[in-house]
Amino acid sequence: MSERFKLAENSIVGRNRKRTKHFHYLTKVLNGFFIFLYRIYLLPLFGLGKRIVIIDTIGWKTRKKRTTPVLALHFYTEFLTFYVARGIKSHWLKNILAADDQIFKIQNGFKKMQVKGVLIEDLEEKFKHLRYFFEELTAASGVFGYDKEKHGDVFQTEEFKEILEIIEFLQIIPMKN
């Protein structure tokens, strides 16, 4: 018999949902350190450029340049896809959506490129992405606190539906130079 799935409070999404002052400060410091190591090509050298991408956007309110590390994955589609834990509340997603034609710059490993972001709005498509995340990617344990062996099939539970409403997926389409 499988244990009932509940979003773990110590998971990334669980901590983001609480948004404590300490967690916010810690992520801000770690993001700055991470961006520095990424920009000097140390992290891409060790292979972290495959999962983490640095995005450069313009602030939707301030119009200042903003840099953020983002988890980027290849789901079942051919496109690189950003997973947005905070959903539409995420500042970097607001920046992208406010930009002209949703065009912005990313650094993926050693490559820098201009891309267009397309928000996945279809609920069925979001369901497919999230299901793939849970079933196929080992990151689901740290991100959501999900263990396939322990929790089994959770795709019809209220907890999964709640996560589906919060999470956003942004597909990345490279622009031709």
Image (tube, rainbow, N blue to C red):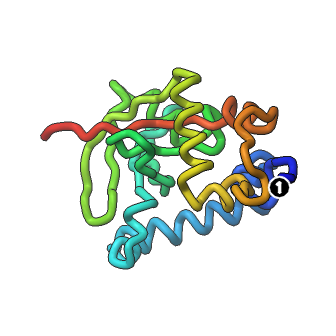
Closest to the observer, 38 or 135: 135
Q: Residue at x 63, y 37 (%)?
A: 167
Q: Please, is residue 42 above or below residue 68 in the view?
A: below
Residue 124 position in % (x across, y down): 56, 24
The residue lying toward the viewer, choosing from 161 and 97, is 161
Residue, far top: 122
Quarter of the picture containing the C terminus is top left
Secondary structure at badge 1 equals: loop
Judge from the rendering whether residue 73 lies leftward or rightward of residue 30; answer left or right.
Answer: left
Q: Residues within 10 Å of mark 1 (few under 14, many from 20)?
A: some
| Residue furthest front as drawn | 1
What residue do we see at 37% from left, 45% from top? Answer: 80
* Residue 40: quadrant of the picture: bottom left
Above or below, 37 relative to 170: below
Image-quadrant location for residue 88: top right
Q: Nearer the viewer, residue 149 or 108?
A: 149
Q: Residue furthest left?
A: 177
Image-based side of 111 in relation to 85, left or right? left
Residue lying at 38% horizontally and 39% vertically, measured from the top left: 77
Residue 3 at what x, y percent from top left? 86, 53
**Residue at (32% x, 64% y) in the render:** 109
Residue bearing mark 1: 9
Front residue of 100/73: it is 73
Direction from residue 43 to residue 90 in the image, left or right: right
Q: Is residue 16 left or right of residue 59?
A: right
Give coordinates of residue 52: x percent, y percent.
45, 60
Q: Position of residue 148 (x, y in %)?
A: 69, 56
- Give the residue type at disc 1: Glu
Could you tell me how many numbered marks the image carries? 1
Q: In the rendered image, which quarter is residue 99 located in? A: top left
